[in-house]
Amino acid sequence: MIARGDLAVECGWERLGDVQEEILSICNAAHIPVIWAAQVLESLVKTGVPTSAEITDVASGRRASCIMLNRGKHILEAVSTLVVQSQLVHSLVSGYFPTV
């Protein structure tokens, strides 16, 4: 599990992105499942409105085996957003560009 809050405490905020990517790469190469967690779509889950950083953050988590969301008032919207964003990223990575 990549618990990003704990990871930031251990490696520092400035290295969080690099260390997260390194863990994902190592685990994917070794075929080890990865849970990507902590503060994923947190603003959306709590307030119903995502930040732009949260939306782009979902693209970073696409390499994980699963993404874990925290509970909150707007969890269904968060799950829906996660599904839509994951599908868009997958289609772009696969070379298919849907019409918008």
Image (cartoon, rainbow, N blue to C red):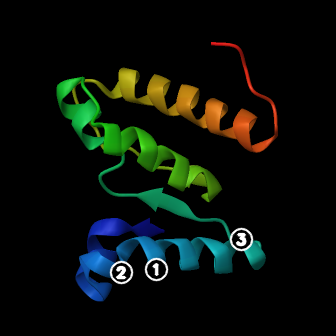
Which quadrant would residue 32 be assigned to in this image? bottom right
Q: How far apart are marks 1 and 2 (CA)?
A: 6 Å
Q: Earlier in the sequence, mark 3 or mark 1?
A: 1
Disc assigned to residue 28: 3
Which residue lies at the image location 74% right of the left edge and 44% below the top edge?
Answer: 93
Which quadrant of the rendered structure holds the C terminus? Answer: top right
Return the residue nearer the eye: 22 or 31. Answer: 22
Return the residue nearer the eye: 34 or 82. Answer: 82
Which quadrant would residue 49 be assigned to in this image? top left
Is residue 77 left or right of 64 when viewed as pictured?
A: left
Label 2 neighbourhood size at 10 Å, few (<14), some (14-19), many (20+)?
A: few
Q: From the viewer's perspective, is residue 73 above or below residue 32?
A: above
Indicate the amino acid at tag 2: Arg
Q: What element carries label 1?
A: helix
Front disc: 3 or 1: 1
* Residue labelled with disc 1: 19
Q: From the viewer's perspective, is residue 12 above or below residue 5?
A: below
* Residue labelled with disc 2: 15
